[in-house]
Image: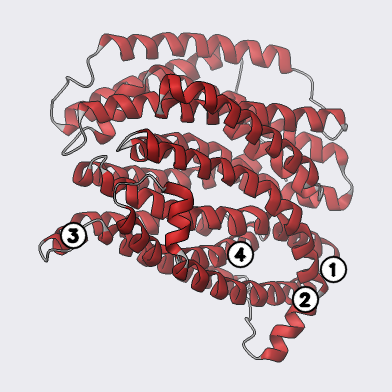
Amino acid sequence: MNLLKAASTVSLLTLVSRITGLVREQLIAASFGATAATDAFNVAFRIPNLFRRLFAEGAFSQAFVPLLGATREREGDAATQLLLDAVATVLSWALLVTCAVGVVGAPVLVWLIGSGLAQFDTAVVLTRIMFPYIGLMSLVALAAGVLNTWRRFAVPAATPVLLNVCMIAAAVWGAPWLAGRGIEPIYALALGVMAGGVLQLAVQLPALAAIGRVPRIGLAPSRVAAAWRHPGTREVLRKMAPALLGVSVAQLSLVINTQIASHVAVGAVSWLSYADRLMEFPTALLGVALGVVLMPQLTAAQARGDGAEFSGLLDWGLRLTVLFALPCALALLLFPVGLVTVLYHYGRFSAQDVAATSLALQGYGVGLLGLIAVKVLAPAFYARSDVATPVRIAIAVLVASQALNLVLVPWLGHAGLALSIGIGALFNAALLLAGLLRGGVYRPQPGWPSFLIKVLLANAALGGLLWWAGQGIDWIGLRTDWAQRAGAVAAVLAGTAILYLALLALLGLRPRQFARSG
């Protein structure tokens, strides 16, 4: 399998997802602005997403995917199916209980994350509507782990589009329909989230059936007990404990930051959320794509005891990270107002909202390289069943980022929260890399100094063009129609991309140098 081609496929599908996600955010920004209602929705939506990252994409995936890949590599498909059935059974019942508790305990959850919300009661109702989303997405994560292990990357990468489409429909048609009946229109977005979750799970089943790996979930008490006793289930639970601690530390930082933002100003939670959506665009296109492709390859290399292949995969991922993350970070740092304006400055989204969101985007941009590098470095530890090291690093990052908040938030307000996250991401990546180097797991291949010089020279030219475009045009005052404004921003981005790629080619970097089979 050509890993560059596989990563490109995932990245392309993720691009479609992120484009629809940006359209979704545009419509929400234009329809609702950055208000107390959008703050309530963002906090409520963050709660099931927080639990999803803890249990589904976080601790569960870190424990389950390496075990699944190792079982298939060593014991074959029959043993792998038994493992899948057992884990799916235990997971499904655990999710049922979790969702019931979450719906009942919604007021406590909202208070823990956003006690300063102006529309606290609205956030509670929204949380109760959306909390079952965690159950749907946890099962989606299970399916995605199986499909990625079988190198079927397309469906998991494309699935998030369905959530965005449902939320777009909710904003365009659902919100006005509720408003016409005297019902708070923000509730339409919550219903759109749930519809998107159902559809995301539904599309996984045909893909699993195509490879003969649809999990059989036990309903009878005897089957549930047997699933609980399965050694694979115990192994996943054993590995989840330290992984859960590590992911919990990262999510605790998010909870603290949201709580702080809810007290900074009305709209602060929304400004950070809109900026985060833009920041996640390059993070997903590159970081998630590389992480998805690398994880099963690293697991297989570790199972074979092939240290050279393991290190080579990391080197390949890190070079692609540097090559593409640096120009994206410069775009966020030097051209934030243009990006925010063309995407959000419509309807109820004011010039003040543009300025506030742009400041948050610059804070995130500081740490973009670190955020993407972590997606490459962390799987190296999980593939080796080393969860303790990332946990220790996550705790150190939490302490450092919150110490930064004490200094930055009084000075920069909500932008200080974004900046602390950015600096923390760089710190996280640096510590992960140092651990891999110190343990001899990663040995950089020859050519890094000349590679870095070429990339930095190309980025210097790109940065100059972005700075000129950002400073030379009054993007907020450019109140033309959407097509003209979008065309101007597209011209800037396309021009800088062409310049960057042309300079890389002149300096001797070619796409074939990054081709890799696995």
Q: Residue furthest left?
A: 180
**Rendered image: mark on residue 142:** 4
Which residue is at the front of the view, 273 or 372?
273
In terms of secondary structure, where does tag 2 sit? helix
Mark 3 or mark 2, which is nearer the start of the sequence? Answer: 2
In contact (CB < 8 Å): disc 4 and disc 1: no
Q: Earlier in the sequence, mark 4 or mark 1?
A: 1
Splitting the image into 4 quarters, where does residue 250 fall? top right
Task: Locate residue 253 relative to residue 495 in the image: left or right.
Answer: right
Q: Earlier in the sequence, mark 2 or mark 4?
A: 2
Residue corresponding to mark 3: 173
Discs 2/3, front: 3
Q: How far apart are labels 3 and 1 at the CA level?
A: 51 Å
Q: Position of residue 456 (x, y in %)?
A: 58, 12
Q: Is residue 70 above or below residue 283?
A: below
Residue 78's label in the rendered image is 2
Q: Secondary structure at mark 1?
A: helix
Q: Amino acid at mark 4?
A: Leu
